[in-house]
Amino acid sequence: MLEAGEPFSLRAVAKRAGVSATAPYRHYADKDALESALATEGFRDLGERLAGAGGLAELGVAYVAFALERPALFQLMFGNPCDDADDPRVRAATEIRRFVKRVIATTYPEADAAALATAGWALVHGLAFLHLDGKLPAGDPAEVADRVRTSMAAILTAGRESPAGGG
Amino acid sequence: MLEAGEPFSLRAVAKRAGVSATAPYRHYADKDALESALATEGFRDLGERLAGAGGLAELGVAYVAFALERPALFQLMFGNPCDDADDPRVRAATEIRRFVKRVIATTYPEADAAALATAGWALVHGLAFLHLDGKLPAGDPAEVADRVRTSMAAILTAGRESPAGGG
DNA sequence: GATGAAAGTTAACAGCGCAAACATACCGGG
DNA sequence: CCCGGTATGTTTGCGCTGTTAACTTTCATC
């Protein structure tokens, strides 16, 4: 699979496969197509990972853990723009949001599941990227998991108080 | 400043400045140093933008709007890992979190301001990236702003209900 | 006017994505 | 058995990239 520090280039991939630099073009139209294929596989892995997590909080923890364990793959999946709505990546991402929405609908039956799913997704996605990009310390996985739980708890319990200023 | 679709390369920057390809090396050690400098400037702009936003929700809207209006700069600021804690980018990012924390401390006086600041930041950061990378539709700015407000409202009011399953 | 730093120059290198033309292996139908 | 097509791989080459090295120009200061 994808290692951590390795440079991701068509040539590097080809060399690692013990094949000439341009051989990948027999299988993928261009680099973006290869990335899309790898990303799609990554979305499947992420989906399995999330399916194995029990409870909303652990869903978030699993999402961030996946990002930090396979940073290159996660960047491939999310880190570059793919405006085409038919892109398998966008499709796979939508499916993940649907899954999160189902979990949320059972956890918070009275809430707007769609909006809450988007928000929850964005929350853990942001946490993942902030850790990946060094804006939050990502050294200790347990510490990261704690930060995810604390963040989710904080933002979910904040609403119980009355905000001081108008929104 | 940084235009939208332009390729960001040292050579392109140099050419645009009407100067030879290697001239930038007289001013910056390498490409990363140039990016760091541009990113730092971007953080200052973002800080001003956020300071001009009234209320927590509009803070989030301003953050995402900034990201979508200046995507290349935003990617420069956040989109690549900088593990060095002394990096000006990391410093500037920390300062922004401090600012958000102050706003939050006055909005939700009884909450854990630090945790809530991290969570709120991650939420809008995730929204920004999901829009930037095409995982959420970013066509209409007003629609995006609405999604930001809806997301923040949804996640903040969800806690008022009792969760169905244990978290 | 000499000196030295600051800034810009050209030339060159390895690596990149990608295209074109060419080679090889396999496999079913005459 | 041969023929032809499909899948897969090759070499070569183009223009781009970041980066280094060596050389030049500009200009303030002693």
Image (tube, coloured by chain):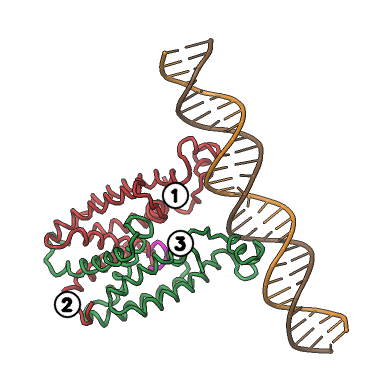
Chain colours: A green, B red, C brown, D orange
Q: Secondary structure at mark 3?
A: loop
Image: C30 above or below A33: below
Q: Can see residue B66?
A: yes
Drawn side of residue B165 relative to residue B19, left or right: left
* Chain letter behind tag 2: B
Asked if marks 1 and 3 fall on the same chain, the answer is: no
**Residue type, mark 3 in image:** Asn
Q: Secondary structure at mark 2?
A: loop
Choose between C20 and A16: the one closer to the eye. A16
Q: Earlier in the sequence, mark 1 or mark 2?
A: 1
Task: Place residue A130 in its image quadrant.
Answer: bottom left
> For the magenta stretch, what is the residue range?
B130-135
* Chain letter behind tag 1: B
Q: Position of residue B92 (x, y in %)?
A: 31, 48
Image: B90 above or below A64: above
Distance between mark 1 and mark 3 Cα atoms: 17 Å
Distance between mark 1 and mark 2 Cα atoms: 45 Å
Tally the numbered discs.
3
**Residue type, mark 1 in image:** Glu
Mark 1, residue position: B3
**Residue type, mark 2 in image:** Glu
Marker disc for residue A80: 3
Asked if marks 1 and 2 fall on the same chain, the answer is: yes
Q: Position of residue B94 (x, y in %)?
A: 28, 51
Task: Place residue A10 in its image quadrant.
Answer: bottom right
Marker disc for residue B161: 2
Category of crowding for the residue at label 1, using alpha-carbon neighbours closer than 10 angstroms: few (below 14), some (14–19), many (at least 20): few
Q: Secondary structure at mark 1?
A: loop
